[in-house]
Image: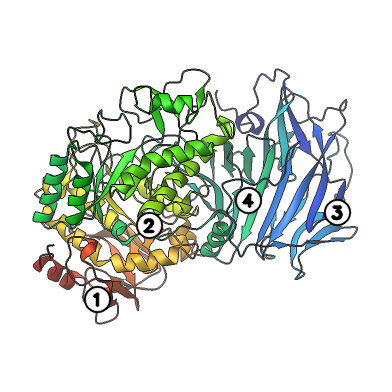
């Protein structure tokens, strides 16, 4: 359907022909406000509008009354919710309140001018304006305007967030609604809420968004789907959370298909829409982005600490097919002194490539227990690929179908996305059914008890939609599915191995509790690198702590499987991976560094550096599990008042101390923005003042534009190792960045001159 530039059609999804079966119900001024068990309840009339593009009330129908409930938690969280014929503040798997989150009783104060809501400390949490319009009446050309929902919220008692009561040209032409719902064929199809956006306000977040840092001027569909790359509007990980440059956050608690319009359909408003008969929205305050995201994690959960070995190198490709092939690669990595901890087997370890049956091919992997054990003795942990869809030809199909461990199809669906096989996936495992969860965990348990340490929970963005599930309708399950899927794999892995970890692609609010996640199927190109970083920055601004990406991109260009990856791209993406929370090589063709002989020496140096930085990664990961910080951070985390930083999406902080600016071209140069402060070049030791741009900063291929805050002390591991089993973290030393620092090359020369110990 062509865009009309009318909000009713383009955002609320009305049929432009207005056939008469869709109706907008628009809120008016509350008829009553009262206290209710510590909450404040607003009784609001909703008037049905005529089925047309102009907003004109239908006088033949009386208004419907619904209650909007206001609740506060602690000092800096305000929640408002409405249910049209359903529960207004529902629980779900998404929410996981921290023990510190307590409901704060609210009190109502009434004057002729306003209803004012305060907490126990007397802090104002909301205010409903009751003043009449200030008019100088001289014309009856247009109908008089009616009072709207003039409600302002104060999540931290300082910043005002007010609903968009009058985002209009004239009463018949609205571009946003403070509160409304859409009815189709007598059923509520969707609900919407809008709040005011300041002219210079910036927003970030909404999940792994492959776009510019400031999201203003865009509308996003919050429906998980296979992204098929990192340079388009599709995304694997949607999160209904927005962070404002005015230092507040907005979290819409839902799993339904939704939309965020960020000052797009109206430049005056941010608009939320959920395809269900309720809205449940948290407004979250804080003095910094970190504090806001900490408060958000207090609602939806914190990332957990990951095992030491996970911070080492992961080696993979699509795919290794046999024990002999894997052993040859692992032995050569050791022989040529490329440190590595994890060998990942992708789609090829089954009897048939892509036919996921959770069992090793008995011919190509004749003794899986011995195979995994031998790799473990060589310092390698094994990670395995699988998916949540059961093929018609799979060994488990009949059992899953008979016991309803997978969904019941109502009609045949062709699975799209990045399913590169010709297999018929007959159903999606139903994680809303406890017996199906236990059955699935049993499949993984056998592999984990062999010594496998991690399950790649691939896919999960799409499910069979024309199907029945035990716990909820497909439309509500689609976005939530990733959380249920990853939770099951995480829990059984933690139970068997002691380490909670998955390698996941899909995501929704709450999935940060089950790390870790990677950025999907990026192109092996500079565009792919740039798009990946954009997605990682927004994901870190959406509550996730850890994030990785395929080095040097997943698929080749233009030949998807066979085009050769350029040497300089391989190096630059390796550098990006070294300064990410996790480093995994993966893709459609050869990824092992010795397959790139012209640059193998450079890559070896960078992998040695990665292992030297592991104590720092452990330190920063511990911080991530207790704060609002991710490992890979947008500059706004540390410079929220620097307006420039709200527009930079090609640089980032790596933990507290490193400022990283990946080179994304073959010219070995780029512009770099140094925020306020004193900065020391990681490679040369040169100290430069911040608050300025370094134009066309030149950087040779074996280096990277990386700076460290002057005065920092970074824990590093000073000894060469082939894997983390050889590390004794008590030998960690502190690297001081002061006037005596002369660059990292001295340490790198030591690591390269001393071969890693052998078992």
- Is residue 431 at least partly visible in the picture? no
Position of 645 relative to 535 (above/below): below
Label 2 – label 1 distance at C-alpha: 25 Å
| Tag 4 near tag 1, CB within 8 Å | no
Front disc: 3 or 2: 2
| Tag 3 near tag 2, CB within 8 Å | no
Q: Earlier in the sequence, mark 1 or mark 3?
A: 3
Mark 1 closeness class: few <14, some 14–19, many ≥20 residues within 10 Å: few
Mark 3 closeness class: few <14, some 14–19, many ≥20 residues within 10 Å: some
Q: Earlier in the sequence, mark 2 or mark 4?
A: 4
On the image, numbered disc 4 is attached to which residue?
Answer: 197
Q: Nearer the viewer, residue 225 or 454?
A: 454
Mark 2 closeness class: few <14, some 14–19, many ≥20 residues within 10 Å: few
Position of 715 relative to 331 (above/below): below
| Tag 2 near tag 1, CB within 8 Å | no
Front disc: 2 or 1: 2
Q: Earlier in the sequence, mark 3 or mark 2?
A: 3
Q: Secondary structure at mark 4?
A: loop
Label 4 – label 3 distance at C-alpha: 28 Å
Label 2 – label 4 distance at C-alpha: 47 Å
- Is residue 158 at least partly visible in the picture? yes
Direction from residue 653 to residue 123 in the image, left or right = right
Q: Position of residue 13 (x, y in %)?
A: 62, 28
Q: Secondary structure at mark 3?
A: strand
Q: Position of residue 157 (x, y in %)?
A: 70, 65
Mark 4 closeness class: few <14, some 14–19, many ≥20 residues within 10 Å: many
| Tag 1 near tag 3, CB within 8 Å | no
Label drawn at residue 498 = 2
Position of 183 relative to 480 (above/below): above
């Amino acid at each position: 359907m062509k865009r009309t530039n009318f909000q009713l059609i383009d955002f609320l999804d009305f049929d432009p022909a207005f056939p008469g079966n869709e109706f907008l119900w628009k809120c008016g001024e509350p008829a009553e406000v009262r206290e209710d068990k510590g909450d404040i309840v607003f009784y609001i009339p909703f008037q049905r509008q005529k089925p047309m593009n102009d907003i004109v009330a239908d006088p033949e129908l009386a208004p419907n009354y619904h209650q909007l409930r206001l609740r506060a938690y602690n000092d800096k969280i305000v929640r408002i919710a409405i249910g049209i014929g359903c529960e207004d503040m529902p629980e779900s798997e998404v929410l996981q309140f921290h023990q510190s989150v307590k409901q704060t009783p609210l009190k109502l104060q009434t004057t002729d001018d306003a209803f004012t809501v305060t907490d126990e400390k007397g802090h104002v949490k909301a205010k409903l304006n009751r003043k009449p319009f200030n008019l100088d009446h001289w014309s009856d050309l247009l109908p008089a305007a009616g009072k709207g929902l003039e409600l302002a919220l104060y999540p931290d008692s300082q910043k005002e967030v007010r609903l968009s009561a009058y985002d209009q040209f004239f009463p018949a032409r609205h571009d946003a609604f403070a509160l409304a719902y859409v009815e189709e064929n007598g059923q509520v199809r969707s609900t919407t809420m809008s709040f005011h956006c300041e002219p210079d306000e910036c927003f970030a977040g909404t999940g792994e968004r492959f776009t510019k840092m400031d999201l203003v001027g865009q509308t996003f569909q919050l429906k998980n789907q296979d992204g098929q790359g990192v340079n388009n509007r599709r995304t694997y990980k949607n999160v209904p959370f927005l962070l404002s440059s005015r230092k507040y956050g907005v979290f819409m608690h839902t799993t339904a298909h939704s939309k965020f319009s960020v000052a797009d359909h109206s430049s005056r408003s941010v608009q939320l829409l959920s395809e269900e008969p309720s809205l449940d929205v948290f407004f979250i305050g804080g003095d910094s982005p970190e504090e806001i995201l900490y408060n958000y994690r207090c609602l939806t959960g914190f990332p957990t600490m990951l095992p030491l070995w996970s911070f080492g190198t992961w080696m993979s490709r699509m795919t290794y097919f046999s024990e002999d092939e894997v052993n040859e690669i692992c032995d050569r990595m050791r022989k040529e002194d490329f440190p590595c901890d994890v060998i990942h087997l992708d789609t090829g370890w089954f009897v048939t490539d892509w036919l996921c049956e959770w069992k090793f091919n008995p011919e190509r992997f004749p003794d899986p227990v011995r195979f995994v054990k031998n790799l473990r003795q060589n310092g390698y942990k094994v990670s395995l690929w699988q998916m949540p869809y059961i093929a018609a030809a799979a060994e488990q199909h009949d059992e899953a179908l008979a016991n309803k461990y997978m969904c019941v199809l109502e009609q045949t669906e062709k699975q799209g996305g990045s399913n590169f096989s010709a297999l018929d996936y007959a159903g999606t495992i139903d994680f809303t059914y406890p017996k199906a969860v236990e059955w699935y965990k049993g499949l993984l348990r056998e592999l984990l008890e062999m010594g496998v340490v991690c399950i790649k929970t691939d896919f999960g963005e799409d499910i069979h939609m024309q199907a029945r599930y035990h716990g909820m309708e497909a439309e509500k399950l689609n976005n939530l599915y990733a959380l249920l899927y990853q939770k099951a794999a995480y829990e059984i892995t933690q139970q068997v191995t002691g380490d909670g970890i998955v390698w996941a692609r899909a995501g929704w609010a709450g999935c940060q509790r089950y790390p870790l996640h990677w950025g999907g199927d990026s192109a092996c190109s500079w565009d792919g690198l740039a798009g990946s970083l954009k997605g990682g920055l927004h994901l870190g601004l959406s509550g996730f702590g850890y994030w990785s990406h395929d080095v040097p991109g997943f698929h080749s260009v233009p030949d998807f499987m066979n085009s050769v990856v350029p040497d300089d791209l391989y190096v630059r993406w390796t550098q990006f991976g070294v300064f990410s929370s996790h480093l995994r090589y993966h893709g459609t063709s050869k990824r092992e560094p010795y397959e790139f002989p012209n640059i193998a020496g450079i890559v070896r140096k960078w992998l040695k550096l990665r292992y030297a930085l592991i104590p720092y990664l452990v330190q920063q990961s511990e911080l991530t599990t207790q704060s609002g910080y991710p490992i890979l951070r947008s500059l706004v985390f540390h410079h929220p008042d620097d307006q420039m930083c709200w527009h930079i999406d090609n640089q980032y902080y790596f933990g507290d101390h490193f400022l990283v600016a990946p080179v994304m071209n073959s010219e070995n140069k780029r512009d770099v923005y140094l925020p306020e402060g004193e900065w020391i070049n990681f490679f040369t030791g040169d100290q430069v003042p911040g608050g300025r741009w370094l134009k066309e900063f030149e950087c040779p291929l074996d280096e990277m534009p990386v700076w460290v805050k002057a005065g920092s002390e970074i824990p590093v591991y000073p000894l060469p190792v082939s894997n983390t089993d050889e590390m004794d973290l008590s030998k960690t030393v502190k690297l001081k960045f002061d006037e005596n620092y002369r660059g990292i090359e001295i340490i790198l020369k030591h690591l390269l001159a001393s071969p890693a110990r052998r078992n």
